[in-house]
Structure formats: structure tokens, C-alpha cells
Amino acid sequence: MAVPSIFSMLVTSLYNMADTFFVGQIDTPSTAAVGLVFPVMFLIQAVAFFFGNGSGTYISRQLGARNETQARDMASTGFFYAVLSGICICVVGELFTDNISSWIGSTPTILPYTRRYLRIILLGAPMITGALCLNNQMRFQGNARYAVWGIMSGAIINILLDPLFIFVMDMGVAGAAWA
């Protein structure tokens, strides 16, 4: 169970590496913006892991005790709170995008790129928290392989969409965020 868990965490880093690689071919301010937004992305992932791991351990114990109703209720509760937290992160982040950009180190030169990339990432926060919460819950239910395949498919799609959105559709740093 540990190997798929470690692999899942490594694959989530592929999203960031792919964005950095492709955005790095555009220009320096775009690359800096992607690098600056990483801590926000890690915060979103941490919230998802908080709810996924917390509810996942309870789900495991309840499934072991053959309390499927309580396990199901916890799965729903953990997922709901993860998505709700993602919505809160999105709303607060969108309201304070410039402040957050400054706090994470954006300069006036990089601010337009950081703002563009960060706003799109924040829009995806509810989906990211929900998906990663479910992924962790699946691992705790003994479905580690499915969880890894889910994470890997997302990373592969991101790697394929990055060049399409960034270069073919000429979306620049915003294309990396949408991918």
C-alpha cells in the first residue's frame, strides 16, 4: 500500500514539472509566475489530503468492522468538506489574488502573469480538493491501484494539453493553468 501512495504523491508533482517545462519555453516572467504559485497549489493539495486521509482512516476502520453505512457516510462527509474547503479557497483567493501574489513573492513585473495563472488555478480548487480527497479515500479502502491510475491519467492529460493550450492555442501561461 505504501508504494502506490508514494507514487501518487510523486505523480502530482508531474503536474507542476510539466507546467514549468512548457511555460519555461515561453518567457522568464511566465516561468517565475508558475514557480510562485506552487505553494498555493501545495496548500490546495494539503487541504485535500487532510480530508482524504482523515476520512480515509475512519472509512478503513469502519469497513474492517463491517459498518458500511458509517463508512459511506464518512466518505460523503469527507468529500463534501473537501469540496467546500476548495470553494472557500477559490472565493477567498479570487478576492485577494493581488495580495496573495505579493505574499508569495510576485514583483510588479511578474504580477500580471502570476495573477493570470493563480486565478485559473484557484477556479480549479474545488475540483482538485474533491478529486484528491476521493483518491486518498480509495487508497484507504484498499483500491490503491485505481487511485494511482486516476492520478496518472490526470498527469498524462495535463502533459498532453499543456503544449496544445500553450503553443497551439497561444494561451501562454493561462494555457498551462487550464491544462
Image (cartoon, grey):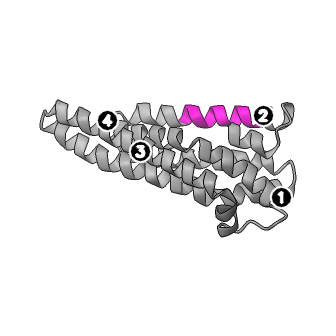
Dot label at residue 82: 3
Magenta span includes 131: no
Q: Residues within 10 Å of mark 3 (few under 14, many from 20)?
A: many
Looking at the rendered structure, the kind of residue marked 3 is Ala
Horizontal relation, residue 147 to residue 64: left or right: right
Q: Earlier in the sequence, mark 3 or mark 4?
A: 4
Q: Which residue is mark 1?
A: 29
Dot label at residue 165: 2
Q: Quadrant of the N terminus?
A: top left
Residue 33 coordinates in the image, percent (x, y):
75, 57
In three-dimensional space, the C-alpha distance between marks 2 and 4, rounded to whole angstroms, equals 34 Å
From the viewer's perspective, is the residue at label 2 or at label 4 nearer?
4
Residue drawn at the location 66% of the way across and 66% of the way down:
104
Horizontal relation, residue 85 to residue 67: left or right: right
Is disc 2 placed on a helix, strand or loop? Answer: helix
Q: Earlier in the sequence, mark 3 or mark 2?
A: 3
Is disc 1 placed on a helix, strand or loop? Answer: helix
Residue 120 coordinates in the image, percent (x, y):
67, 44
Q: Earlier in the sequence, mark 2 or mark 1?
A: 1
Give the extent of the magenta segment.
152-163
Q: Which residue is mark 4?
A: 76
In three-dimensional space, the C-alpha distance between marks 1 and 4, rounded to whole angstroms, equals 41 Å
